[in-house]
Image (cartoon, rainbow, N blue to C red):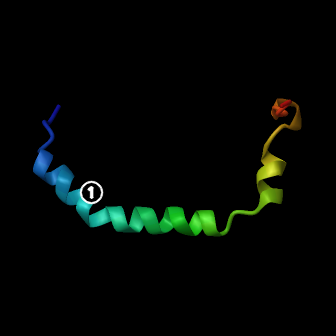
């Protein structure tokens, strides 16, 4: 197996980190509570009994 050059990894991350974060923020901006709740099983949701 070919060894990994750490400089190449650093360059790749520096070049792509902004795009990665923009996609994550965009995804969070478009989040909808109804969509989330559709994916979650209500029987697994824990109620807080304080």
As drawn, 5 above or below 50: below
Q: Quadrant of the C terminus?
A: top right
Q: Badge 1: how crowded within 10 Å, few (<14), some, or many (20+)?
A: few
In the displayed orientation, state which residue is furthest to the front: 50
Residue at point 20%, 50% (across, down): 9
| Residue drawn at x 14%, y 36% as measured from the top left | 2
Would residue 8 appear left or right of 48 to someone viewing this image? left
Question: Residue drawn at (26%, 65%), measured in percent from left and top?
Answer: 15
Q: Position of residue 33 (x, y in %)?
A: 79, 58
Towards the viewer: 13 or 44: 44
Task: Kindly indicate the quadrant of the structure image that contains residue 35.
Answer: bottom right
Q: Which residue is mark 1?
A: 13
Q: Viewer-proximal residue, 12 or 41?
A: 41
* Residue 49 image offset from top left, x and y in percent: 86, 30
**Which one is nearer the viewer's eye here, 4 or 40?**
40
**Does residue 29 sit above or below 46 in this rendering?**
below
Lateral position of residue 6 relative to residue 26, left or right = left
Q: Dot 1: what SS?
A: helix
Q: Position of residue 34 (x, y in %)?
A: 83, 58
Residue drawn where x is 11% and y is 44% of the image: 5
Where residue 4 sits in the image (x, y, percent)?
Answer: 15, 40
Q: Which image quadrant for residue 32?
A: bottom right
């Amino acid at each position: 197996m070919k060894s990994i050059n750490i400089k190449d990894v650093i360059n790749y991350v520096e070049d792509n980190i902004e795009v990665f974060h923009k996609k994550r923020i965009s995804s969070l901006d478009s989040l909808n509570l109804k969509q989330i709740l559709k994916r979650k099983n209500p029987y697994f949701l824990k109620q807080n009994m304080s």
